[in-house]
Image (cartoon, helix red, strand yellow):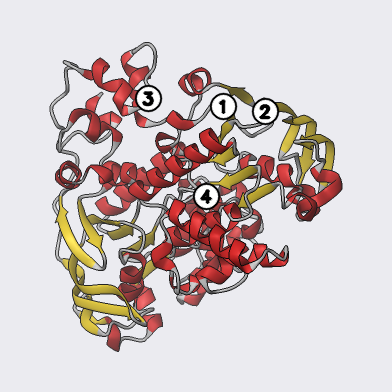
């Protein structure tokens, strides 16, 4: 049995050009396939064709054939494919039905009239596999983004599908949780023959585990498929060690840090250039002894930190460590049970929310919560008018964020990464002096992440203060001046990124792990 797509062409309703054009691919049952490509290139669309979401849910025009282990998704639709294919979306919140964790895990089994003992057995099995037993009894709405992601994957696995399709499953996971998830998937693939399709931007986490890579370039270009050693050395998007291998002419090009170590021995390194860690100014945002709990679950326990003008501060930590809660408390969306937040010397708890957001811009983890206008241009114009700022042409900012071609597009029609950048634009257009960002690289490919890193450094050099909660160690390596590490709602470490990376390997960039150096954290630092 196999999976095949033959001369597949698909266009979304009203689209000027097809999202996929004349795609023909085949996969053996039991393969682990990575689907990669630029944000908005059609990766998610390709995955949605496998279970009939395209075109049954999204509409549009469809031609060609799809066969998944003997079934036709075009004829059967998502319902007819649901016992064969488990599908986990980019945004796990979009597929939750109920708010209790165990109820969510049981829901799909209940609809198929599974017996209570069988449901209990399956819930226990998938919870152990994904390490979420400690979340039993919790409400989904109180979980972190990464915890929700694992619950969504567990719910899909509870039906024991033959094929599992995952759209950016590690995007909201901390590095350790991402490794645990991928090893669990490898185990299911190797031991049970589960066929896996996985779309991912953080390739450094995945490439060593997959059998096949499908590179979707977008813009009507031909899709490239093959083994990881065939595709990755030539793809424009590549992990840091692959880029380093290309720059140094290493053959074969290494795919992992472990493969790169023998090649890097004795490699001459340039002296540190001192571009990192500029001189920060006065404290503009501070937290003193913040404590917050969701019911009996303590999310923050005595957290204190300072953010200075002209500084980028990264907040790191495992899923559920309190990063998002900290950001929401800093911006005044949550009121701490103890402690105080000062914004430019004034108590945030005593300021009206409109007064806070005039000074402080907040980009949440779910960008859709900020987007409600008909076009991208109108989103930015609305922000200016709601802040009582004079009208301003948004085009320069859109160009700076690589969004100029989407000025007249409905924001919710964009990909996750594109919506993330629109949300950032909608905040930046108000010119806040302090910027808080929750997982800012969610859905961004390497090229977009490089552009974002450059933009954040420019904003810092202009005197902005930036605090970002992130699992993206390569982003921290590229632009952060300081980092704070949270665990179970407490600050357990802080310092310069390279020093923290040496103390916590799970938060180290690939180049930091390769050279064990506190100053050389990126490919650019060593080339």
- Distance from Cα at disc 1 to Cα at disc 3: 20 Å
Q: Nearer the viewer, mark 2 or mark 4?
A: 2
At 52% from the left and 58% from the top, the residue drawn is 393
2 on left or right of 60 = left
At 61% from the left and 61% from the top, the residue drawn is 118
Q: Secondary structure at mark 3?
A: helix
Please give the residue where the numbered disc 4 appears in the rendered image: 417
Please give the residue where the numbered disc 1 appears in the rendered image: 212
- Distance from Cα at disc 2 to Cα at disc 1: 9 Å
Please give the residue where the numbered disc 3 appears in the rendered image: 243
* Vertical relation: 516 (above or below) 413: above
Earlier in the chain: of badge 2 and badge 3, it is: 2
* Vertical relation: 302 (above or below) 181: below
Earlier in the chain: of badge 1 and badge 3, it is: 1
Q: Secondary structure at mark 1?
A: strand
Please give the residue where the numbered disc 2 appears in the rendered image: 27
| For the residues bearing labels 4 and 3, Cβ distance under 8 angstroms | no
Earlier in the chain: of badge 2 and badge 4, it is: 2
484 on left or right of 257 = left
Q: Secondary structure at mark 4?
A: helix
**Residue 89 shows up from this direction:** no
């Amino acid at each position: 049995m196999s999976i095949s797509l033959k001369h597949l062409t698909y266009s979304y309703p009203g689209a000027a050009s097809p999202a996929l054009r004349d795609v023909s691919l085949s996969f053996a049952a039991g393969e682990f396939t990575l689907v990669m490509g630029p944000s908005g290139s059609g990766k998610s669309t390709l995955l949605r064709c496998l279970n009939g979401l395209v075109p049954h849910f999204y509409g549009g025009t469809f031609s060609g054939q799809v066969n998944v282990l003997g079934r036709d998704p075009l004829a059967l639709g998502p319902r007819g494919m649901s016992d064969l294919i488990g599908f986990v979306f980019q945004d796990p919140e979009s597929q939750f039905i109920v708010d209790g964790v165990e109820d969510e895990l049981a829901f799909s089994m209940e609809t198929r009239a599974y017996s209570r003992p069988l449901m209990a057995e399956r819930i226990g099995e998938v919870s152990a596999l994904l390490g979420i037993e400690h979340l039993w009894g919790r409400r989904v709405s109180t979980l972190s983004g990464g915890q929700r992601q694992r619950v969504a994957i567990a719910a899909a696995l509870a039906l024991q599908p033959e094929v599992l399709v995952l759209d950016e499953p590690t995007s909201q996971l901390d590095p350790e949780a991402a490794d645990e998830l991928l090893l669990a998937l490898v185990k299911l693939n190797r031991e049970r023959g589960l066929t896996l399709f996985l779309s991912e931007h953080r390739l450094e986490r995945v490439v060593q585990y997959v059998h096949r890579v499908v590179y979707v370039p977008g813009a009507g270009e031909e899709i490239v498929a093959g083994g990881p050693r065939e595709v990755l050395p030539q793809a424009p998007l590549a992990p840091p060690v692959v880029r380093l291998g290309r720059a140094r002419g290493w053959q074969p090009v290494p795919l992992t840090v472990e493969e790169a170590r023998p090649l890097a021995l004795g490699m001459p390194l340039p002296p540190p250039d001192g571009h990192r860690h500029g001189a920060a100014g006065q404290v503009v945002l501070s937290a003193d002894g913040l404590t917050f709990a969701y019911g009996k679950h303590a999310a923050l326990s005595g957290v204190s930190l300072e953010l200075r003008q002209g500084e980028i501060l990264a907040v790191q930590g495992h899923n559920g460590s309190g990063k998002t809660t900290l950001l929401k408390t800093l911006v005044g969306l949550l009121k701490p049970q103890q402690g105080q937040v000062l914004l430019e010397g004034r108590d945030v708890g005593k300021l009206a929310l409109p007064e806070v957001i005039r000074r402080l811009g907040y980009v949440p983890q779910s960008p859709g919560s900020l987007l409600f206008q008909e076009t991208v241009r109108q989103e930015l114009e609305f922000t200016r008018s709601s802040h009582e700022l004079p009208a301003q042409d948004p085009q320069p900012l859109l160009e700076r964020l690589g969004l100029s071609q989407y000025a007249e597009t409905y924001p919710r029609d964009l990909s996750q990464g594109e919506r993330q950048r629109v949300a950032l634009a909608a905040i930046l257009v108000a010119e806040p002096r302090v910027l808080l960002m929750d997982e800012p690289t969610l859905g961004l490919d390497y090229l977009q992440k490089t552009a974002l890193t450059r933009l954040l450094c420019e904003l810092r050099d202009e005197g902005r203060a930036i605090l970002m909660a992130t699992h993206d160690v390569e982003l921290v390596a590229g632009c952060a001046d300081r980092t704070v590490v949270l665990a179970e709602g407490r600050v357990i470490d802080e310092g310069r990124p390279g020093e923290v990376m040496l103390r916590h390997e799970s938060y180290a960039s690939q180049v930091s792990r390769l050279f064990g150096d506190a100053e050389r954290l990126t490919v650019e630092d060593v080339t």
